């Protein structure tokens, strides 16, 4: 998992990786070195204080040029919250995340519906499965133009949708999407905060990290 | 050296809740007659002769603005 200035959720991402049975490797924003990892998690937080646009400056960090190149070679990449914003700014995922519709920062245990298990990060989940995962964001509203939306829906690249309540006005209730090859996934809610009932609403998020172990080199 | 202004606005089809909040606040100032507000960003750059118009549009489109959700106008000031 990558740490940028202002990243918050790298530690919990590392914990989720360890719970899933893999080795957590810390990656540094300023390095051009992915340290031989089999997959990359871009965690949540407020990289660069959300200056300019959330994720905009982080998308230009040296480590991200390595992530983009590795994704081009099929490396699985998961972007969580600010990580999703960074992946969109870096061009690895379509669309953009903008200010929540009601302007409120939303912090809630959010029901999600799994829309695709055909990605590197959702193969251990079930189609139409509902999971409960914390959401905590002020700029979580996913937007995309009509052509992009048609492409995402038509190609089955909507990975998670908000269930019950759309907390931020995201178009088509989209909470997470994937790249064309299904190896890069971004979602606004935090699966890494739902791996242990002691510290989260469920352990539903653990399956996201277990999924990638099946496909990572 | 020259000054360049880049104005960035959300695309017309993007809902702008911050602009709506500003419009609502105008009402609380007792001001009527403002039917819409949209909020953007104004950047002022000081550039030398090596920064041509193509470079300015790269700066705008790759950093100052996100072309998925924003439009921009580049103006060289005399």
Image (tube, grey):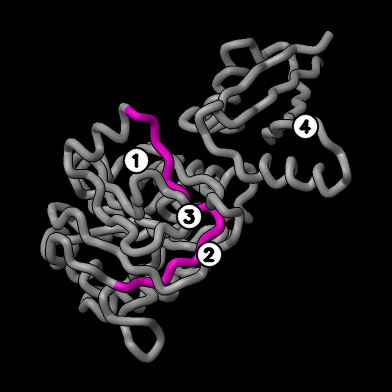
Q: Residue at x 72, y 31 (%)?
A: B35
Q: Where is residue B31 in the image (x, y as percent from the top left)?
A: 86, 38
Q: In this view, does B5 lie above or below A148?
A: above
Horizontally, residue B11 falls left or right of residue B76, namely: left
Q: Which residue carries the number 3 mark?
A: A168
Query: At numbered mark 4, what does the secondary structure look like: helix, strand or loop?
Result: loop
- Asked if residue A37 lies in the magenta stretch, the reply is no
* Residue B19 seen anywhere in this rendered image of the structure: yes
Quarter of the image with the N terminus of chain A is bottom left
Q: Which of marks 1 and 3 is nearer the N terminus?
A: 1
Query: At numbered mark 2, what does the secondary structure look like: helix, strand or loop?
Result: strand
Q: What stretch is highlighted in magenta?
A: A132-146
Q: Which residue is drawn at 50% across and 28% down?
A: B67
Q: Position of residue A60 (x, y in %)?
A: 50, 41
Q: Which residue carries the number 4 mark?
A: B34
Q: Answer few, some or many: residues within 10 Å of disc 1's Cα (few below 14, many 20 plus, some between 14 and 19).
A: many
Check chain identity for marks 2 and 1: say if they share one: yes
The picture quadrant where one finds residue A35 is bottom left
Q: Is residue A45 above or below residue A51?
A: below
Q: Which residue carries the number 2 mark?
A: A106
Q: Distance between the residues labelled 2 and 1?
A: 25 Å
- Are the two marked residues, 1 and 3, in contact with CB atoms closer than 8 angstroms? no
Q: Which residue carries the number 1 mark?
A: A92
Q: Which residue is drawn at 60% across and 54% down?
A: A103
Front disc: 4 or 3: 4
The residue lying furthest to the bottom in this view is A198
Q: Distance between the residues labelled 3 and 2?
A: 8 Å
């Amino acid at each position: 998992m990558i740490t940028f200035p202002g990243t918050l959720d790298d530690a919990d991402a590392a914990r989720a990786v360890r719970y899933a049975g893999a080795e957590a490797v810390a990656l540094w924003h300023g390095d051009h070195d992915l340290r031989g990892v089999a997959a990359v998690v871009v965690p949540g937080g407020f990289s660069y204080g959300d200056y300019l646009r959330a994720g905009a400056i982080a998308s230009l960090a040296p480590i991200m040029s390595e992530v983009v190149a590795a994704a081009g070679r099929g490396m699985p990449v998961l972007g969580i919250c600010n990580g999703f914003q960074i992946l969109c700014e870096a061009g690895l995922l379509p669309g953009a995340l903008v200010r929540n519709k009601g302007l409120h920062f939303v912090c809630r245990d959010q029901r999600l519906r799994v829309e695709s298990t055909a990605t590197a990060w959702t193969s251990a989940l079930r189609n139409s499965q509902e999971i409960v995962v914390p959401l905590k964001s002020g700029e979580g509203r996913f937007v995309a133009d009509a052509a992009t939306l048609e492409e995402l829906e038509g190609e089955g690249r909507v990975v998670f949708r908000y269930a019950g309540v759309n907390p931020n006005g995201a178009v088509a209730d989209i909470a997470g999407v994937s790249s064309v090859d299904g190896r890069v996934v971004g979602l606004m809610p935090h699966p890494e905060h739902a791996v242990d009932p002691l510290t989260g609403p469920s352990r539903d998020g653990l399956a996201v990290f277990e999924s990638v172990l099946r496909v990572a080199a | 050296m020259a000054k360049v202004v880049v104005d960035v606005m959300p695309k017309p089809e993007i809902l702008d809740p911050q602009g709506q909040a500003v419009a609502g606040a105008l009402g609380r100032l007792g001001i009527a007659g403002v039917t819409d507000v949209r909020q953007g960003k104004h950047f002022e750059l000081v550039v030398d002769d090596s920064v041509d118009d193509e470079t300015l549009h790269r700066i705008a489109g790759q950093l100052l603005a996100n072309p998925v959700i924003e439009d921009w106008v580049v103006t060289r000031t005399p």
